[in-house]
Amino acid sequence: MTHVAVVGGGISGLAGAHRLRTLLGPSARITLVDRADRLGGVLRTVELAGVAVDVGAEAFLARRPEVPALLAELGLTEQLVHPSAAVAPSVRAGGRTVPLPGRTLLGVPSSASDLSALLSEAGLAKAAGERDRPLRWSPGEDVAVGGLLRARFGDEVADRLVDPLLSGVYAGRVDALGLRATIPTLAAALDAGAPSLTAATDTLLPPSPPPRVIQCLQHSDSVPPARRFSHPGSPGPVFGALRGGYRVLVDALRAASGVEQRLGLPVRGLARRLDGWRLEIGTAVAPEALDVDAVLLAVPAPVLRKLLADAAPSASRVAGAVELASPVVVALAYRAEDAATLPDTSGILIAADEPLYAKAFTHSARKWPHLAAEATDGLLRLRASLGRAGESATLRVPDEELVGRVRADLETLTGVAAAPVSAHVQRWGGGLPQYGVGHGELVAELERAVAEQPGLAVAGAVLHGVGVPACIGTGRAAAERLVAQLATRPGDSARVSVPK
């Protein structure tokens, strides 16, 4: 019987376990070990005043294929939902809350972007001159996003537009994040010879439809809701989520993978055996040896560094070089009459230099129609995000004080001063890896070192993206590599299917 251990019960490990089961068949033994007492990692769904609300990752990029394909495999396609196209986000910068400019690439302006409500006159002049400013770019180079934007567009575009958007994805700061890892399509357009960042963004955005086409699509009853507010030929909604929260996906993956769960047990060591690997799990006073044929590691960078210290020292050093951010999510439920002044938007992004604790608010009940439909109690639910990179002290703030800070920010931004009916505080210590300059080269070095160890593979957010689709992709790819290696071992080829 083939026996594979999956270390890490987040979405990467669960996706890897599911793929292992598909390829190895029902007779294989798959053991999933996680130091936490629950599955899901940074995916977590809680009951907030009786309605399922995600307090980890909120949405995923629906235009990537990984999540829709996995939902189809699991029979969960009907659970896929999309945000309302009738509301749009806003941004708080320079002491004002204004609509988030459209026609940008993660905030990087195109020639069609209207920045007049967000920037000062001097900032507008600096940004408008970017397309005519000579660009020095060497194909293949990597730079900090902030440094490039400040030199090309000025500080205001970096601080008021791009930083709030990237902070929402990575909980990082624009001046520390690398361009090639965080906005790879923009780097590729520059490699291809785009003469400016504006021109590069123009080539990456879909064409904007004429106003009359937009108006017809928005109001036509014959157009399905998911296609409204888009135009013919567009790839559809950008983001997706799951009705019932991510726990629906987590539970389905657990059931379909048929794993033996060993939860609440840290993995203390990893060592090679003659015909496989040995994991040391449990406490230091009562360790347990788990002997397996192969291991899939889907753990945060610090754990990866520790486990690879002996098996793949160079990979361990790379994992140790990855910095982490520790975000916090505060979910709140309000009576509709107490939140009457909440603006009719999907949420508010907040620039880092604003005198506020939160970095973003999501007006969940307005952004996600399925949440509004499920809220038969008439309550409005929203969530606040706190904790940028370097702000780990936020983790140590008591729950009551965190809720108080969020309420004060909410009153400043929206005028909502009432106490919430319900609140939930979720801390994610070291929850998000930071993709600095040269991150791609570090990952390539890590993967080369791990590939030299037969029966060992790595997956997770530390590699090729922090989003759910990217993590699913790394988990499935790691599983396929392990199965291909197992198929080459004497005696294993008859019971292992090589992935196509």
Image (spheres, rainbow, N blue to C red):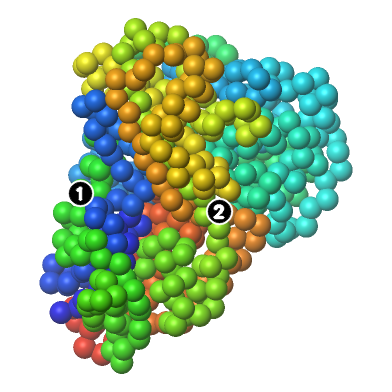
Q: At numbered mark 1, what does the secondary structure look like: helix, strand or loop?
A: helix
Tell me if 273 is positioned left or right of 118 in this view: left
**Quadrant where the image shows the C terminus:** bottom left
> Mark number for residue 434?
2
Tell me residue 80's x, y (percent): 29, 35
Counting residues from the start of the chain, the first of labels 1 and 2 encountered is: 1
Q: Residue visible at 57% across and 40% down?
A: 166
- Asked whether the beta carbons under mark 1 and mark 2 sit within 8 Å of each other, the answer is no
Q: Is residue 482 above or below residue 233?
A: below
Tell me residue 405's x, y (percent): 48, 28
Q: CA distance from mark 1 to mark 2?
A: 30 Å
Which residue was labeled with disc 1? 252
Q: Residue visible at 39% across and 62% down?
A: 299
Q: Is the residue marked by circle 1 packed among few (<14), some (14-19), or many (20+) residues within 10 Å? A: some
Q: At numbered mark 2, what does the secondary structure look like: helix, strand or loop?
A: loop
Select label 1 or label 2 by which is in front: 2
Res 258 → quadrant: bottom left
Q: Is residue 102 visible?
A: no
Disc 2 residue type (three-letter): Gln
> Mark number for residue 47?
none
**Quadrant where the image shows the N terminus:** bottom left
Q: Is residue 172 above or below residue 348?
A: below
Tell me if 469 is positioned left or right of 274 in this view: right
Disc 1 residue type (three-letter): Ala
Tell me if 338 is positioned left or right of 163 in this view: left
**Residue toward you, 401 or 42:** 401
